Image: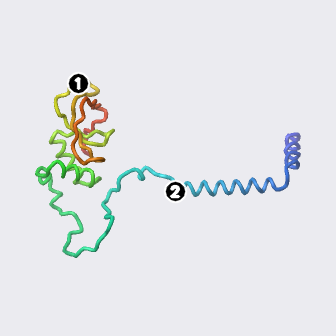
Amino acid sequence: QQQQQQQQQQQQQQQPQGTQTLSLDAAAAYLSSLQESYQHMTSKNDSERPRSYAPRNPYPTPASYPSQPSTVFDNPSIFEKLGTDCLFFIFYYQQGTYQQYLAARELKKQSWRYHKKYMTWFQRHEEPKVTTDEYEQGTYVYFDYESGWCQRVKADFKFEYAFLEDSLV
């Protein structure tokens, strides 16, 4: 042990005097920049859509204008009367609400099925050509909410049951 201590002392004596303080300054700068980058680190919420609507150009409205959604939209029977486009709008823009649940429930009643991987709704256009325990393959209509806000046909699509959303929780 004494030999090791002597070797360490000799190595320290051979280093120029300013080297040790320079390395401490470099370490401090490194830790400071690391702490700064940690404060600006991305989170999983950065890639998610905002949960509530925030207008781009807020405008003062009169008191007579409603500021909260009507309670009529808490009634499930209203959703049976809404069109498919309206149900899709509610599903994608009222996320995490009871109204989203009601819209999803009504879409399922209309034979739409939610695909968890593509995060969109699919409906059979015709009976599947291939059906197994893991998937079915055929022509489907899907709702394109990202680029066109319309229904498109996808031929020879393989719908894997593992990505099928079964629950409405």
The reply, left or right, for residue 129 in relation to residue 31 is left
Total tally of numbered discs in the picture: 2
Q: How is the image coloured?
A: rainbow
Tell me if label 1 and label 2 are in contact, CB under 8 Å.
no
Q: Quadrant of residue 130?
A: top left
Q: Residues within 10 Å of mark 2 (few under 14, many from 20)?
A: few
Disc 2 marks which amino acid?
A: His
Query: Which residue in the structure is indicated by mark 1?
Result: 131
Residue shown at the point (78%, 56%) measured from the top left? 21
Residue shown at the point (26%, 25%) measured from the top left? 133
Q: Quadrant of the N terminus?
A: top right
- SS category of the residue bearing label 2: loop
Query: Which residue in the structure is indicated by mark 2?
Result: 40
Please say if 156 is above or below 87: above
- SS category of the residue bearing label 1: strand
**Front residue of 156 and 113:** 156
Q: Residues within 10 Å of mark 1 (few under 14, many from 20)?
A: few
Task: Point out the tag, 1 or 2, that comes first from the N-terminus.
Answer: 2
**Going by the picture, which residue comes out furthest to the front?**
148
Percent x, y of residue 66: 20, 69
How many angstroms separate mark 1 from mark 2 (CA)? 48 Å
**Front residue of 157 and 93:** 157
Disc 1 marks which amino acid?
A: Thr
